Amino acid sequence: MRVALHEDADRAMVTESRLDLTATDTQMRLLIIEDDRESADYLVKAFREVGYVADLASDGEEGLALADSGDYDVLVIDRMLPKRDGLSLIGSLREKGNRTPALILSALGQVDDRIKGLRAGGDDYLPKPYSFAELLARVEVLSRRHGGPAEETTYRVGDLELDRLSHRVARGKDELTLQPREFRLLEYLMKHAGQVVTRTMLLENVWDYHFDPQTNVIDVHISRLRSKIDKGFERPLLHTIRGAGYMIRDGIR
Amino acid sequence: MTAFGKLIRTTAFRLTLVYLFLFALFAASLLGYFAWNTRRLITEQITSTVNAETGEISDIFARRGLRGLVFTIENRALRPGANLYLVTTPSGQAVAGNVGSLAPGVMGTSGWSETAYRRLDEQDTADHRALVRVTELSSGFRLLIGSDLEERRRLFGIIAKAAQWSLLIVIVLGLGGGTFVARRVLRRIDAMTGTTQRIMAGDLSGRLPVGRSGDELDRLAENLNAMLERIEALMMGLKEVSDNIAHDLKTPLTRLRNRAEEALAKSGSEAEYRSALERTIEESDGLIRTFNALLMIARAESGQARGNMDDFDAADVANGIHELYEPLAEDDGMVLHVKTTPTPLHGNRELISQALANLVENAIKYGKPVPAPQPLGADAVASPASREILIEARRDGDQVLLSVTDHGPGIPEADRKHAVERFVRLEASRTQPGSGLGLSLASAVATLHGGDLRLADAHPGLSATLAIPARMGASDRLAAQMPNVPQKVA
């Protein structure tokens, strides 16, 4: 199931969406605080390739100084850093009233470590080793959230419409009947329309589980949702992004 | 450190010294009090007799004059054990009495005084002491009446001797006892130290000697032994994990490497490279998953995850997992049911969810009915009921039971214990993907919560149950808040 139904189209989509980002968005500024030279260089390069302005700090003190002075959209912070560890860095930023979204990278992938990270003021947490696709997806969601528009009550993607108050979902003139969980799944996807949402993000945000299922549970839920919102319509909205996750968007903008 | 130095430094010995001092102090003050009171009593007795006699004799002198006085004194002085008497003329000459000599000046001052004296009839030159009262009679005559203090002194001597002896006995017994106790304790501590040193040197199977008396040292030894037991188990677990990591992670790593090598060696098209890389990533993802599961198990087993416990309803967990896996099961041709009653539980919700998820994944993977050869021309296709998987959350006595029951081939009784071990994948399941860690994790989670994972026969099929003790108190509070919802069957 993990192999996408719309595989070829989707591969094109990834590149397309990334190109989009460079073209349409004002450039996102990203600060990476990571002491391992190789991973840091890789991250900087990879983020620059997808259109970010990425700066690098290689220890906690430098990271804090940069984060404090620079105007960044997202911080990517390694949990264990020389001079000052990631959590205390976030802590002092928050104390100073700096609310820049921070994503914590950690080799300690356990649940309570994650909770500790979020409690310290982190906005998201990603255990190492991670895939760049996962990191990118999360960073994008974070950068949107920061300073983005207030939560709307109605989400629209193409002719698909979701009313968060009345729990109504319609595509064109057709009213769709969704199970509560399908509704929440679609709601999350539409909230992040145009952004890649990974399976783990879905499991975390829609189901609130933080473990790694050995099977493709999420794919099955997605394919059910897809059969409800895309089946019988000429233009698919829910796309599988190979090697990354899913994205809901109107094919033509 | 010398043996003596060691002995002196023991707590038992130091305590002995403290007690010794306290007891000696107590004995001394007791004797002192006794002595002082005795002295006071004797002195009082002397004063009252002397006072009475002085009154009496003064009376006689007043009534009968000097002659009566002398007569009475002489008479009394001759009695055995008589008091001391002396009458002097105004010029200081002795007229009657039994006193030979006195300390100078005693006769001159009226009132009470303590003095050395000698009796008239005494030959020895040793001085005695007496408490005397001198009274001036009319016309310049002076009368002395006193009592010997020998008795008081003797009594005092006895008490002093008692004090010395008792002090000596206290010290000897105390030191002896202290040494005995300290050496006994020291011997046992030395035995313990020896064992712990052996253990530290690497022999984890060593245990501390436990005596039969059940005293505090035995209890300590027992506790330390229990701790050693746990450490040994953990070490064994660690060793097992590292062995298993070596074995089961190296295999996929080798596969990964081979694949990369093969792709590199072949001059393939871009698409071929791409697919080789994709497979590599897939394989490494699988490795990461296995690794995470291993770490999770290790954490659960070492009890580190105990920090994140809270109160929740096991029924919610069961319903949540049902909701998550129901579509997957359906895709796989299985039917997932859930049956719950409100079951408050205190624990790590995330871990329990994951454990249950593992059981459900197992049931979906391995719980498919066997197309058993059925005689008598019965349906070759298994009945629909046998494609059902049931998730259940309920309370049984003090325990919360979270079970997953399938109607597949099950696990033969002989294999069940084995199945829970890490990486064990029973023969039938080798063809299926999976790390072989699902049941181990579930079992570790159950153990973390003080319960266990039970595998039972579902006739046919497997019933895997997480049996977790419901913490009383906290969970009962929760139960009180929950309305009595009727059973919900999905």
Image (cartoon, grey):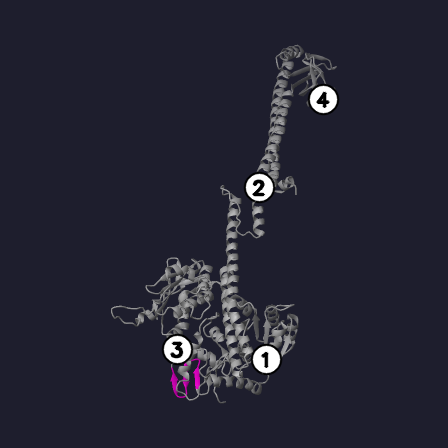
Query: Badge 2 sits on which subunit?
Result: B
Query: Badge 3 sits on which subunit?
Result: A
Q: Is residue B359 above or below residue B124?
A: below
| Segment tinted magenta in the rendering | A160-176
Q: Nearer the viewer, residue B481 or B50?
A: B481
Dots 2 and 3 on the same chain: no
Q: Secondary structure at mark 4?
A: loop
The disc label shown at residue A179, or none: 3
Around disc 2, counting alpha carbons within 10 Å, would you say few (fewer than 14), some (14 to 19), or many (20 or more)? few
Separation of residues labelled 4 and 1 (CA atoms): 119 Å
- Residue pointed to by mark 2: B187
Is A161 inside the magenta-drawn segment? yes
Asked whether residue B307 is in view, the answer is: no
Residue at the image point whose x is 51% and y is 49% from the top: B225
Identify the mark nearer the N-term, 3 or 1: 1
Where is residue B327 drawn, in percent x and y?
39, 75
Indicate left or right for B459 with B444 as reference: left
Q: Amino acid at mark 4?
A: Thr
Separation of residues labelled 3 and 1 (CA atoms): 37 Å
Q: Is residue B222 above or below residue B335?
A: above
Q: Amino acid at mark 1?
A: Phe
Identify the mark nearer the N-term, 2 or 4: 4
Separation of residues labelled 1 and 2 (CA atoms): 69 Å
Q: Secondary structure at mark 3?
A: loop
Where is residue B162 drawn, in percent x and y?
61, 27
- Residue pointed to by mark 4: B109
Dots 3 and 1 on the same chain: yes
Dots 2 and 4 on the same chain: yes
Separation of residues labelled 2 and 4 (CA atoms): 71 Å
Query: Badge 1 sits on which subunit?
Result: A
Q: Amino acid at mark 2?
A: Arg
